[in-house]
């Protein structure tokens, strides 16, 4: 067993190493392919268009370097591919220092040499750890830069005291070399630490595998390039697995996990779900075929290997089930035992008492035993009723029930007393505190009443809506019929047109309100924040509602604009703000027979603006103020017009809350009403006056 586990772990380390090497080879393949393509492109372009700049020897050498790199990559020779960085000094010589072709003087190409070696250092540091090759390449780069400096005749210039450090290629290369060395060494240190931790974990797994005496299966996971599991199959099982599930290791080996475990356990477990879709560290499994319970523990050693350990918990399950059954029986008995029970004789005298102290009652058995029900504070009527129940329970062997109230330190408590015959001379009386139940029944009754009221209001709303929709439609139909008659004057036509427009707007307003209410109830109301210019919005509302003022009422509409500036505004939802104010204006017009309706805004506090709609209408009675915002609630309009379906103020209240305010109302009967809400000023513009 020990050798088996060690072989498994060694194979896993080798697999991890091979997987990492494949990733590096993949990166090298892409890099060499890209370099080869660029080198070929440069060769072709120079030969065709810039023959005077061509360096055929150097360019062919570059192509050969990348071709060699691809060949080594395809053969899987990682180190050979990395050794090709030592071609860089040769390429530098061929491109910048040789006499094979015309090129810029060495003094101008010295920094090209610097960048070639910096790229080579980064290349080595990325694809391998710090080793002799890295140090040798860094030394080669330093020697090459020194040689290039000597060939350029710029040594005196580059090493002068007034020369900037960064402009000296030798210093720059040395600095970059040590920076890359520091970063890569730090990375290697962290990697070694991680590797040591992995080895420690693997050692623990090895010890577990050696010591466990439970059925154990090693599972191999086949994954796609994205890491998704494609297939799970059994690699090994231990002797305990063979003995418990009556299957040999050769039979289990290479079998698909789902097939083998379904065959072994013969239950409805979805093994792919447990291991792939919704993996859990441990799961309870029941095998009806074996009539046994197992606790499955899954231990993933790496992405490709998992250990499945099955702990037999059948005996524990049986004991737990027995305890549960026993607990249920005792719970049933305990539930039958009341908070308090008494033994009362035929004459109503308390013979015994058992008190369950819950803090609601402060009773002392010495104050009760020996006394009668007529001495315990019950009213004469209640005491007589309890006495009659005692007689019926003894004589008829029946169970009697009675409810009563007791005044305690915690207030009035309600109890239910149940009496049953104990013997020929006494009964057992069970007293249970039913205060909570009675309160719940009371609250349920109140909720039922509210629901019934809501249904009634909704029915009333639908009835009103039917009438309110039918009325403008009939008027519009009649007016359009009149419009078809000949001989109408221009004044009459204009009057009919205005009537059609008025009632069409009323109908549209009712439909819009119904849609708004539906969106509010279904929580689908859109809320879009943008900059809102207040003055144009108010003028739009004024122009709209001014045309809707009834001609038969002496009614004026006035607009209050605090700041005469077109850019006055702040960030909010302009659409919801317009709808909210429209609802308030429409409500004011409905309930104002004569006088003035004023609306607008004014600065308030430090960071708020107040929007208001006030009228000189009939006002709202104080007893109605708490109901006006209820949906479908209407106050009967004494004028000939109906007050509407009763949803406008509810919509306005909801929209004001969405915008960050709270709709408030101040009203005096006979003088009018004022609705207002404060909104926070978010990113205000237009020199709004802020009052501190």
Image (cartoon, helix red, strand yellow):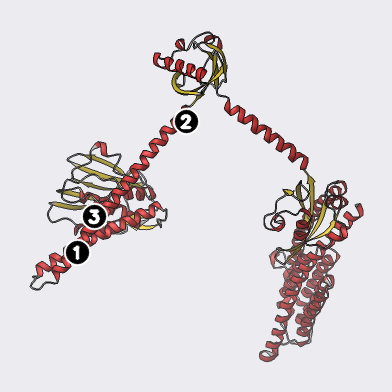
Which residue shows up at 78% across the image and 62% down it? 256
User: Horizontal placement of 514 versus 403: left or right?
Assistant: left
Instruction: Please tell me which residue lies in front, 382 or 31.
Output: 382
User: Nearer the N terminus, badge 1 or badge 2?
Assistant: 2
The location of residue 621, given as percent across then percent down, is 23, 38
Could you say whether the residue bearing mark 1 is in a helix, strand or loop? Answer: helix
* Whole-percent x, y for residue 530 in the image: 39, 58
Q: Is residue 572 among the parts visible in the rendering?
A: no
Disc 3 crowd rating (10 Å Cα; few below 14, some 14-19, many 20+) is some
In the rendered structure, find residue 476 and report the number of the disc placed on it: 1
For label 2, the residue is 437
- Say which element carries label 3: helix
- Name the spot of residue 642 as percent of width and height, x first: 20, 50
In terms of image quadrants, where is residue 49? bottom right
* Figure quadrant of residue 675: top left
Q: Earlier in the sequence, mark 3 or mark 2?
A: 2
The residue indicated by pointer 3 is 467
The image's mark for residue 146 is none
* Residue 408 in the image: above or below residue 93: above
| Front position in the image: 392 or 37 | 392
Q: Quadrant of the C terminus?
A: top left
């Amino acid at each position: 067993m020990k050798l088996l586990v060690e072989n498994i772990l060694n194979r896993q380390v080798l697999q991890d190493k091979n997987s990492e090497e494949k990733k590096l080879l993949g990166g090298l393949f892409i890099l060499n392919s890209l370099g080869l393509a660029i080198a070929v492109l440069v060769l072709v372009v120079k030969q065709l268009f810039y023959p005077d700049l061509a360096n055929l020897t150097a360019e062919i050498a570059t192509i050969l370097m990348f071709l060699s790199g691809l060949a080594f990559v395809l053969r899987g020779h990682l180190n050979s591919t990395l050794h090709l960085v030592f071609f860089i000094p040769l390429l530098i010589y061929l491109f910048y220092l040789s006499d094979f072709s015309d090129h810029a003087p060495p003094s101008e190409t010295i920094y090209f040499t610097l960048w070639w070696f910096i790229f080579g250092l980064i290349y080595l540091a990325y694809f391998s750890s710090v080793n002799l090759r890295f140090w040798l390449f860094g030394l080669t780069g330093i020697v090459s830069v020194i040689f290039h400096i000597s060939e350029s005749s710029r040594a005196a210039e580059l090493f002068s005291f007034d020369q900037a450090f960064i402009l000296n290629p030798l210093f720059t290369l040395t600095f970059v070399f040590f920076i890359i060395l520091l970063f890569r060494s730090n990375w290697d240190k962290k990697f070694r630490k991680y590797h040591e931790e992995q080895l420690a974990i693997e050692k623990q797994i090895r010890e577990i595998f050696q010591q466990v005496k439970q059925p154990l299966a090693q599972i191999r996971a086949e994954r796609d390039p994205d890491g998704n599991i494609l297939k799970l199959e059994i690699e090994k099982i231990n002797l305990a697995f063979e003995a418990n599930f009556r299957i040999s290791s050769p039979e289990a080996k290479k079998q698909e996990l789902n097939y083998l475990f379904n065959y072994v356990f013969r239950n409805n477990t979805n093994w792919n779900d447990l291991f792939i879709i919704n993996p859990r560290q441990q799961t309870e499994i029941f095998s009806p075929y074996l009539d046994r319970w197992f606790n499955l523990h899954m231990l993933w050693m790496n992405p490709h290997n998992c250990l499945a350990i099955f702990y037999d918990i059948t005996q524990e399950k049986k004991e737990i089930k027995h305890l549960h059954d026993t607990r249920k029986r005792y719970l049933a008995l305990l539930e039958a035992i009341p908070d308090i029970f008494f033994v009362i004789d035929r004459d109503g005298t308390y013979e015994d008492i058992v008190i369950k102290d819950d803090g609601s009652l402060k009773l002392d058995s010495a104050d009760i035993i020996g006394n009668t029900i007529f001495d315990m504070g019950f009213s004469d009527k209640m005491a007589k009723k309890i006495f009659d129940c005692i007689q019926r329970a003894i004589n008829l062997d029946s169970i009697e029930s009675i409810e009563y109230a007791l005044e305690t330190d915690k207030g009035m408590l309600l109890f239910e007393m149940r009496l049953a015959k104990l013997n020929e001379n006494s009964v057992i009386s069970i007293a249970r505190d039913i205060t909570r139940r009675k309160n719940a029944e009371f609250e349920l009754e109140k909720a039922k009443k509210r629901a019934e009221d809501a249904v009634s209001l909704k029915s009333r709303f639908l009835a009103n809506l039917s009438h309110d929709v039918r009325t403008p439609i009939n008027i519009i139909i009649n007016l359009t019929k009149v419009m078809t008659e000949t001989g109408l004057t221009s004044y009459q036509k204009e009057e009919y047109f205005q009537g059609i427009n008025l009632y069409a707007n009323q109908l549209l307003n009712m439909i819009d309100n119904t849609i708004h209410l539906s969106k509010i109830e279904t929580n689908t109301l859109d809320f879009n924040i943008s900059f809102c210019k207040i003055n144009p919005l108010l003028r739009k509302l004024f122009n709209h509602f001014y045309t809707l003022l009834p001609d038969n009422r002496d009614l004026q509409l006035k607009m209050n604009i605090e700041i005469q500036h077109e850019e006055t505004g702040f960030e909010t939802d302009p659409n919801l703000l317009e709808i909210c104010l429209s609802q308030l204006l429409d409500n004011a017009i409905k309930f104002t027979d004569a006088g003035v309706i004023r609306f607008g805004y004014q600065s308030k506090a430090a960071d708020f603006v107040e929007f208001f709609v006030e009228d000189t209408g009939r006002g709202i009675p104080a007893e109605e103020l708490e109901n006006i915002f209820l949906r479908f609630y209407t106050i009967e309009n004494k004028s000939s017009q109906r007050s509407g379906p009763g949803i406008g103020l509810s919509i306005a209240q909801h929209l004001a809350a969405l915008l960050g305010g709270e709709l408030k109302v101040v009203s005096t009967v006979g003088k009018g009403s004022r609705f207002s809400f404060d909104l926070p000023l978010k990113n205000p513009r237009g020199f709004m006056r802020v009052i501190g």
